[in-house]
Image: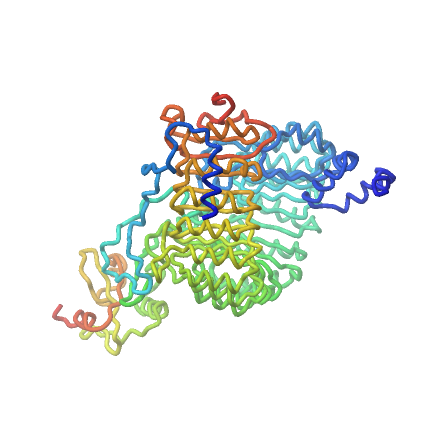
Amino acid sequence: MENSVAYEKATELRLGLPGIDEPAVLSSVKNNKRPLHDEKSGENGKSAQNETAPPSKAQIVGWPPVQSYRKNNFQQAKKSESECGGIYVKVSMDGAPYLRKIDLKVYKGYPELLQVLENMFKFTIGEYSEREGYKGSDYEPTYEDKDGDWMLVGDVPWEMFITSCKRLRIMKGSEARGLSCSGV
Amino acid sequence: MQKKMAYSFPDEVLEQVFSFIQSDKDRNAVSLVCKSWDEIERWCRRKVFIGNCYAVSPRMVIRRFPEVRSIKLKGKPHFADFNLVPDGWGGYVLPWIAEMAGAYPWLEEIRLKRMVVTDESLELIAKSFKNFKVLVLFSCEGFSTDGLAAIAASCKNLRELDLRESEVDDLSGHWLAHFPETCTSLVSLNISCLRSDEVSFSALERLVGRCPNLRSLRLNRAVTLDKIANILRRAPQLVDFGTGYYAAELQPDVFSNLAGAFSSCKELKSLSGFWDVVPAYLPALYSICPRLTSLNLSYATIQSPDLIKLVSHCPRLQRLLVLDYVEDSGLEELASSCKDLQELRVFPSDPFGAEPNVSLTEQGLVAVSLGCPKLRSVLYFCRRMSNAALVTIAQNRPNLTRFRLCIIEPKTPDYLTLEPLDVGFGAIVEHCKDLRRLSLSGLLTDHVFEYIGTYGKKLEMLSVAFAGDSDLGLHHVLSGCESLRKLEIRDCPFGDKALLANAAKLETMRSLWMSSCAVSFGACKLLGQKMPKLNVEVIDETEPPDSRPESCPVDKLYIYRSVAGPRFDMPPFVWTMGEAVRILH
């Protein structure tokens, strides 16, 4: 390659300081910061039960390159949200490639929450009844409570729900129907 | 014959002719024609731009250009924006102000970017320049509202006070009251960076009310939504407005008051601010949306449906800054509604989250590049990209001049093929022949640099992170990019060979930043010795570089050309590589 010939010639400038013959192969310097999760599944997203994702990433200084001015100002906005005592939980839907996050405190009750979920993920939830759960749809809203159990949304009073809900999952298909039978 | 003609014009005539020549480049060319033109030109140069405050000394500037009225200075390297330059590195403006105070009593304008400005500097400005008109402090720090009070009080003809994105020690909102009642000259006031909750609102209202030429006003968060209407009614001639806090409980009378106030601003073309937005108040803007050319919603945590509604009312939009809440769907709407769009910046709402929180992918950018024929400038944060998308963007938008893509996870490959994104970025540089600025991200090998060196002939600024395999990558860029002025690199395996082989290139550039790369201390010393017109600064906060073997890589390296020689205001963690193996400190 023309380039490498010229490149070699041009290195005559180097007056042979000892120890710098190879292009630096100082592996200690080579970036070892590989992405923490190697799966780049893109379309086929992670299901809500992908517990192998690490809890938090080691932050690299100055990356992503968001100006510190912007970070500070945005964090102020976010901070004031949490200072108001918002209850943020993740929401996943089986088959959707990404998760959402909502503030349970914003809603006054189940009807509003379910409406929001329907809009967010573009689907319909069936009719709720205490005996048979949600009928008329393939989807059922469920949540993980403080004890780690998966419960059907709507069974407990709203206030109890928002304090015990850790995350939401909109289940699809047979799994969902299994939950709604009182046998679970 | 021609030579005689040049000398037969009296100086005043030539001066008059030169006064029509505004660009620095042209002025510099004029001064090279002959000695007499150089002499005439330097006496009538009124504006000086110094892209690196350490490239030249204040005295040298004053000696050459004795009658300057307007100066623009830049200090810290760009990567300082991302906390890569330690505090105390430098960029102090005081020495400049001190020299200019004596030499330029008629100085009117000072524009600074990324510099350390103290209250002392501001007080000196207020005291020294009787006809002072314009102060722009872009991304500066080191001063407080006390310094601003001095400016407000003393500068009788102040036209512009713009503190954009600066860090101000906000001691008190009362500095605004220091503007005398006689001050009516303000054209532009930007206090959006001030954080304190107390802004002397009555002082602000009165100030706005008595400045009939006020065209640009950017408020800070402390100004609540209900106060906006009052301000706007006092300044219906505004062209550019930055709101404060755009949130409140929805009240019909507040809403209609606000909507009415906005609609009375017939010249309003540019909006920004929008911290803490309540979407219900966005329709108050609808009357001015048809005229809007610039919209900065990059702090507004509003979701895609509300963004879509707003944007669809703005067919004349040329510039949009927004968070990734806009999502692909929002960008598709943008592409169909805003055919005049020239600049798009999409910022990440959750840059440190491990999972994507919004549905924003490469599709959004592709849609905008297809739908907006005037698109020239892009800054885009996303989590996935493909070569195919980049090629599509490149082919559809060869008129791009600035393309900055940040794929949030370092070294992310093409999500479809899992290959590096070399081909995609290669297409960008190949098709976009006027590309001046490029930022790379994702998985990249030396090949991308080969493309850049081959095609990036107009490229002036390149930002690289977590890319490349070997020195060949750096060599391609330094040897191929003829117009390169600024190069900033972090976490790449680039070392001594390419740097030393292209040492002469560095004198043709403004600066080179390399951090967490593989350049050895020995190479830095060599470069410092061999290239007296370069300042080679090694930055290391943990220990002196000479306490380790010479083959050890340096932590951070900043090289810039200078006619002023090494600087003397360095902190303990910065070393300049000097002549004869002596390290100046």
Task: Give x and y (percent) for residue A139.
Answer: 26, 72
- Looking at the image, the residue that sits furthest to the bottom is A136
Please identify the quadrant where the N terminus of chain B is shown: top right
User: Which residue is painted at 62% across and 29% down in the image?
Assistant: B57
Q: Is residue A103 visible?
A: yes
Task: Give x and y (percent) for residue B144.
Answer: 54, 35
Q: How many marks on residues?
A: 0
- Depth check: give the residue in front, B69 or B264: B69
Residue B416 vertical placement versus B43 (above, below): below
**In the displayed structure, does residue B272 sit left or right of residue A44?**
right
Task: Give x and y (percent) for residue B232.
Answer: 62, 56
**In the displayed structure, does residue B338 sit left or right of residue A133?**
right
Task: Give x and y (percent) for residue B97.
Answer: 64, 31
Q: Is residue B144 visible?
A: no
Quarter of the image holding residue B356?
bottom left
Quarter of the image holding residue A95?
bottom left
User: Which residue is painted at 78% across and 37% down in the image?
Assistant: B37
- Looking at the image, the residue that sits furthest to the left is A183
**In the displayed structure, does residue B145 sit left or right of residue A165?**
right
**In the displayed structure, does residue B187 sit left or right of residue A52?**
right
Residue B299 vertical placement versus A168 (above, below): above
Q: How is the image coloured?
A: rainbow
Residue B204 vertical placement versus B266 (above, below): above
Quarter of the image holding residue B233?
bottom right
